[in-house]
């Protein structure tokens, strides 16, 4: 286990909330390839649920008689369900194990996806997207907890980076596949495809073992576990790690909600080409996740997070300059936004891993809280782009810059705690 506990001296010195002596250590045996494949699929539900229909958003608006802001709210509605739902699935996973709550969540996802496919207005679509998100988030939050069941310390962050590299295939292919489905069969078929994906993942879930043994489950009442969030949120170190990822998610979801209209409507990019441009950012995310998985055990989660948030801040400010002035047109804006999202590989896994490392006995609840903060920030980012929409890329550039600055500034909470 020595290599699994490896990390920087800073990371080891930062631990402020040691686990109770009775907490059992993570399983010593690494998961098999099948487990990793299923975990990657579960963690990819947040991406595939939105990325697949991004190229169809303008067409959906025309078909449903809705304006740009209303269709962008289908992203915000998804994030509301995704953020709040995690707060319930986390304690349920700590009490009843991981597989059962994930299975129930996948059923909600299937129902919500079918509802989206038969929606006849933007309002209906937003409501069904909330249901879809409540189901999708169960797999994401508990897949992270399953990683914490099996690994600890910088090794957990390393495994999260590996999983995110694999799961990046979903957003890499999502807009491209979505654009082709739109061209061949219309936007409603995209959601029927998501129904099929949900059912296939549900079947695959029962081919892997439960990672949380009976003796390690949290037996306190669910309401008490929910009340425990108040205690967790007061931990400055946890909050600093979570906020660094949260601000970055605000920029990511501003990018997701704003680029279809900035590229397709403002710069007249074909929907099929939009998918290719979007995929380039995913390649960047995969590359930085691979870099993080190689370096995090040696440099530590905090150091890697500092590098990532610094890069996000600088690329966000450059995006603001290009978006406000129009300098370089489409390709300058797209290149700077792709650079911004590429820092995800150094930010997201380390934000989650840093927050999880002090609380192995409450991995589900901590994962849920961090996820809720991340995606709650995503709500703010996508909603801000929707509220400020003026038919130009300027609102997208502004939100991206603010997100980068906030992500970098959040690490002061971690640093302040270390100095004290």
Image: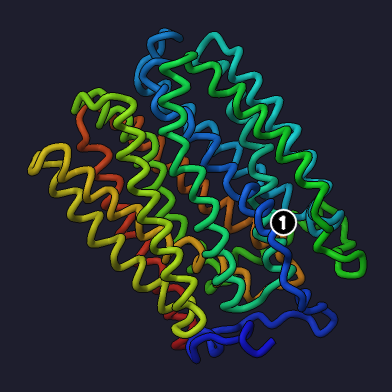
Residue visible at 66% across and 37% down? 134
Q: Is residue 244 visible?
A: no
Q: Nearer the viewer, residue 118 or 162?
A: 162
Q: Is residue 260 above or below residue 58?
A: below
Q: Nearer the viewer, residue 177 or 118?
A: 177
Residue visible at 39% across and 27% down? 55
Check the picture and name the quadrant holding the N terminus: bottom right
The answer to which quarter of the image holds residue 388 is: top left
Q: Count residues near mark 1 (Cα–Cα under 10 Å), then give few for <14, some for 14-19, many for 20+.
A: few
Q: Which residue is mark 1?
A: 34
Q: Is residue 415 above or below residue 374?
A: below
Q: Is residue 101 visible?
A: yes
Residue visible at 47% across and 22% down? 181
Q: Position of residue 313 (x, y in %)?
A: 28, 61
Left or right placement of residue 69 versus residue 320 in this view: right
Left or right placement of residue 392 versus residue 288 in this view: left
Q: Position of residue 28 (x, y in %)?
A: 76, 78
Q: Tag 1's secondary structure?
A: helix
Q: Is residue 391 above or below residue 67?
A: below
Q: Position of residue 227 (x, y in %)?
A: 74, 57
Left or right placement of residue 69 versus residue 105 in this view: left
Residue visible at 41% across and 27% down? 72
């Amino acid at each position: 286990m020595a290599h699994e506990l490896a990390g920087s001296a800073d990371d080891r010195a930062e631990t402020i909330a040691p686990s109770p002596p009775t907490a059992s250590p993570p399983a010593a045996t690494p998961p098999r390839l099948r487990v990793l494949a299923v975990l990657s699929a579960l963690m990819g539900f947040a991406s595939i649920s939105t990325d697949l229909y991004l190229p169809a958003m303008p067409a959906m608006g025309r078909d449903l008689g809705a304006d740009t802001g209303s269709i962008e709210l289908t992203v915000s509605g998804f994030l509301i369900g995704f953020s709040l739902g995690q707060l319930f699935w986390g304690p349920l996973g700590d009490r009843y194990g991981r597989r059962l709550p994930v299975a129930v969540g996948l059923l909600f996802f299937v129902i919500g996806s079918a509802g989206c496919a038969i929606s006849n207005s933007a309002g209906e679509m937003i409501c069904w997207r909330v249901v879809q998100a409540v189901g999708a988030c169960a797999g994401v939050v508990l897949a992270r907890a399953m990683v914490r069941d099996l690994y600890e310390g910088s090794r957990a962050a390393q495994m999260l980076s590996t999983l995110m590299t694999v799961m990046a295939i979903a957003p890499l292919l999502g807009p491209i596949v979505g654009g082709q489905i739109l061209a061949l069969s219309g936007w409603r078929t995209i959601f029927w495809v998501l129904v099929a994906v949900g059912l296939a993942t549900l079947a695959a879930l029962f081919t892997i073992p439960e990672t949380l043994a009976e003796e390690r489950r949290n037996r306190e009442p669910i309401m008490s576990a929910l009340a425990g969030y108040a205690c967790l949120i007061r931990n400055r170190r946890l909050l600093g790690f979570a906020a660094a990822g949260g601000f970055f998610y605000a920029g990511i979801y501003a990018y997701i909600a704003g680029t279809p209209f900035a590229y397709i409507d403002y710069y007249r990019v074909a929907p099929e080409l939009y998918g290719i441009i979007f995929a380039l950012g995913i390649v960047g995310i995969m590359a930085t996740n691979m870099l993080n998985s190689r370096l995090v055990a040696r440099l530590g989660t905090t150091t890697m997070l500092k590098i990532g948030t610094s890069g996000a801040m600088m690329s966000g400010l450059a995006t603001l300059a290009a978006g406000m002035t129009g300098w370089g047109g489409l390709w300058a804006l797209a290149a700077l936004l792709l650079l911004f999202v590429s820092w995800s590989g150094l930010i997201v896994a380390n934000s989650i891993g840093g927050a999880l490392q002090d609380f192995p006995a409450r991995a589900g609840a901590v994962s849920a809280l961090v996820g809720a903060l991340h995606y709650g920030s995503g709500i703010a980012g996508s909603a801000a782009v929707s509220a400020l929409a003026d038919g130009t890329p300027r609102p997208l550039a502004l939100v991206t810059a603010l997100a980068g600055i906030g992500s970098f500034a959040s690490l002061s909470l971690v640093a302040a705690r270390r100095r004290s």
